[in-house]
Image: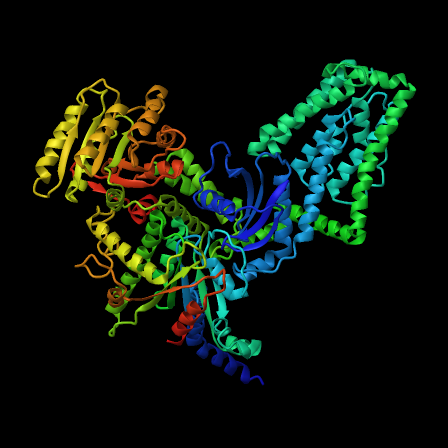
Amino acid sequence: MLDLFEVVTTSGVVLWSRSYTPVKTSVINSLISEVIIEERTQPGSEGKWFKKDSHTLKWTLATDFGLIFVAVYQSLLQLTWIDELLDQVKKLFVALYGDKIKASNGSKIECHFDKYFDSSVRSLEHKAGSQTAAHPSNGRPAIDIKQQSDHDEASIGSGDNDEWLAPPPMPGVSQFGNGRSRNQASDTPVSSVKQNHHLEPTSNSTPPPSSPALMAQALLQAPGRRPGGRGRRSRKSAGHSGASSAHASSGEERSPARLSAKPKRGKEMRIWGEDGSAAEAGEEQKLDYSGTGGGSTDEEHDDSMRARPEAVDQSTWGMKTRQGDFVLKDLDYEINDILKQANETDKKGPTGLASGLAAGAMGYLRNFVGGKTLTKEDMEKAISGIMTHLLEKNVAREAAAQICDSVQISLVGQKTGSFQSIESLVKVAMEDALRKILTPTTSLDLLREIEQVRSNERRPYVISIVGVNGVGKSTNLSKICFFLLQNKLKVLIAACDTFRSGAVEQLRVHARNLKELSEREGGVVDLYEKGYGKDAANIAKDAVAYAASQDFDVVLIDTAGRRHNDQRLMSSLEKFAKFANPDKILMVGEALVGSDSVQQARNFNAAFGRERKLDGFIISKCDTVGDMVGALISMVFATGIPVVFLGVGQNYTDLRTLNVKWAVGLLMS
Amino acid sequence: MTDSFPQWEILGLSVSLPILLISLIAVILIPVVLSRILASKSQDGPSSFFLLAGPRDSGKTSFLLYLQEKTLIPTQTSTTSATVKLPTGVLEQIKSEDGGSSALEDTGSRHSFHLKDTPGHPKLRSQALTAINLAPKSCIGIIYMLDSAVLSSQPRLTDTVEYLYELLLVIQKQFASLSESAATSPDPIPLLIACNKNDLFTALPSAKISNLLQIELGRMKETKRKGLLNAGAGEEDDEDLDRVLGDENSDHVTWEGLREFGVEISVQSGSIKSIAAESWKSWMSSCLDA
């Protein structure tokens, strides 16, 4: 089950937490650092979940209150109700403590949230339990799932079931004399689900059997009346529910949810099979037929079916009474009320005409005066404006859209300052977001690292350079080499482009030039070459060994250019990384590249195997694009890997480190 | 009665022109002035505050909460900064323990200070730096908190020192601009390097940490001087040209040397977990007294 549930403020204070098993704090810390601050989503999660040390974390944010709600559970478990729980807890917590939190200015407040939380968990668990395990002998899984999916869509307190379930034609509903007992038997599970809907502990009352939902069940169960009809209908509804639950449930759970829906069907068919019929889904009518046969065994069977669900309900009821009937009842009503209110305010929007007009006028005024609380709709225009601006700056569309989304989400619920327009607020937020993206999380001091490796490990520091064809790998390698030589380091250049003719000769020319330039400075440079056609990984390995024996400080490895979507060429990179084991793998990317930048960065980042990632980007040809430096953002955003160098010209000296302020200034100008 | 009417009219007309002009001007100006005042008020932060900075997981938020609530409260990584107003009694409470809560309330009503907690995640460090840049005068002291148990590992040490370097550089810049504008050179900002978590087994003693930090800062300064130019350098003159920390002619960084560049550093160990933060508190109250 759940391991830990925590409510944290953005300023880092744990306001409330409920721990079922001890979980390291680093688990949630890494969620906040990696996902919420660095906005790095784990592959395949689509930002819906986060896995760390056998735990799965799900979270939701209340940005206007500065709250983060995190649920932690074992990855082995497939808890489908976590999203619902998060949503419900968020609404409850904000409704109960929202004002206090706003007033407290991000510090600790008192929360007596335990009972609310427990009640929420219990009701959701109970609902999930009734969905998956409560009625083993119930032959109508499709309906239960359907109700569940209704739930997911309309959340709590909606009464849409009837609309969903009631089939337009209802021939012979009243003729289900013998099917009736079964219907009654199944009354209780259905009603229990319904009660969860309203979170009311009144499970003893049975709803009138003539409710449309029941009639629908009866119809679906029509024994022999519509031989093909039933199968088709249930299949259809199952498909429906599968689709809608896939909608409602999220990311990772998507496929398990569907899976759990289908095997359950199969399983229950098998249970029917124990009664003497085959386990095929198409032969359900036979089972019903045996029901209409009306033997004593069937009545016994019906009795048992009637008894079991009631027993379940009574046990939950009893548990509640044991814990104090009145308190719980009040609490559940309270929770229900709060949630209803929250839902209503959610749904509210453009309402009545007169009030709408007044609100519109006020809103219009507030556009100028400030003090307007932002909604998603308010920002639509400003966000799309800034998105076009980003696209004009050559940011890849994918990256621009995602950045804009996160900015929009971060601004919802904020108030504009006095005389501050939405546009300026969005602009400021965008500047912050861009700065956050470009700011590196690790030290990029290359000289310092080389010094450390040299003094601590007595081995050469290895840098290898990869990239797509023609982006300037060799040129930038020579620039870095020149920079290192100026710092009086002994550099070996390894020519591992054994593919393109002229590549080795090109490096030879560079090495000769650099030798001449650095003679007076005191740096030493040499070229390690083995001609063409050989395996690059082996040459790199030999070069590193040679450098170690000759006491070089740094090895710079040049590699062949490769297209990022060419599997054959990209796959050799993994071996290369293993053999040469570089301290830094830098990827050269052109500032000129447009929407392809995201994919290039991702593919190269993934090409070195599981353990190895890129260490940095060199963005070349920055002098050719003016202020359209969007490729910087696209590449860093796609991978979270920092920009180490910028190439800004044709000379050996035209290499710069990234200045985040400068880049953000260019992008926002 | 009949005579008085024209008199009234004349009176009204004769007065009307200047009054009309004045009132018109007043009508136009008052909202503008009011909004200006209101706007400036809302933008201003607290008049005097302590800044709490340092790498992540060092215990900044815990310290803040400890001062506020006097108990240990679990925390997670912060993503936003928080400013909390605290009575000065918080700092003196342990000293005059028998004084009781009444004394605390007395001092609390008279004096209070703000403590600004900033996130330590590398991507969010700019928040602390901009806090200094925005209000260098109202910052009465900086607490740089670090985890003394992890400094033996090189990456964590580099991370810690790099942040400290950036912070010191910002202080130095602000100090330079302040002393340019003022006739007399302003007082250096006190900075406490609070070596937290000294209850842990791997924790280094404060003297060792002090030494280590100075050496590392020196090395960092050396490589920064040798390093490449920034991309924006040369376009904008003064601001983006990164100055080196401290004395330009030497590669060494010492706490005494930094004093003339606007920061007075003291290093003190402590532990929030084992409620051993007295030295930090007394440092804070000495800052408040100054």
In the image shown, does A383 or A129 lie closer to the viewer?
A: A129
Instruction: Pinpoint residue B214: horizontal percent, then vertical percent.
Output: 28, 59
Quadrant in which the C terminus of chain B appears: bottom left
Asked whether, in this view, residue A22 is left or right of residue B273, the answer is: right
| Residue A393 figure quarter | top left
Residue A589 in picture, x, y percent from top left:
29, 33
Count the marks. 0
Is residue A187 shown above or below A362?
Answer: above
Left or right? Give the position of B61 relative to A555: right
Q: Nearer the viewer, residue A385 or A185?
A: A185
User: Can residue A297 be seen here?
Assistant: yes
Q: Nearer the viewer, residue A366 or A578?
A: A578
- The quarter in which the N terminus of chain B is drawn is bottom right
Whether residue A105 is situated above or below residue B284 in the rendered picture: above
**Position in image of residue B252 (x %, y %):** 22, 58
Q: Is residue A43 left or right of residue A273?
A: left
Q: Is B256 situated above or below A527?
A: below
Residue extending furthest toward the right: A296
**Relative vertical location of residue A9 with respect to residue A611 in this rendering, above or below:** below
* Residue A253 or residue A24, whichever sits in front: A24
Q: Is there any visible trace of residue A649 in the rendered image? A: no
Q: Which residue occupies 14% across, 24% down?
A: A505
Most extreme residue toward the front, as rendered? Answer: B201
Across and down, in percent, residue A461 comes to 25, 38
- Position of B168 with respect to B203 (left or right) is left
What colour scheme governs how the chains and residues are painted in the rendered image of this protein?
rainbow
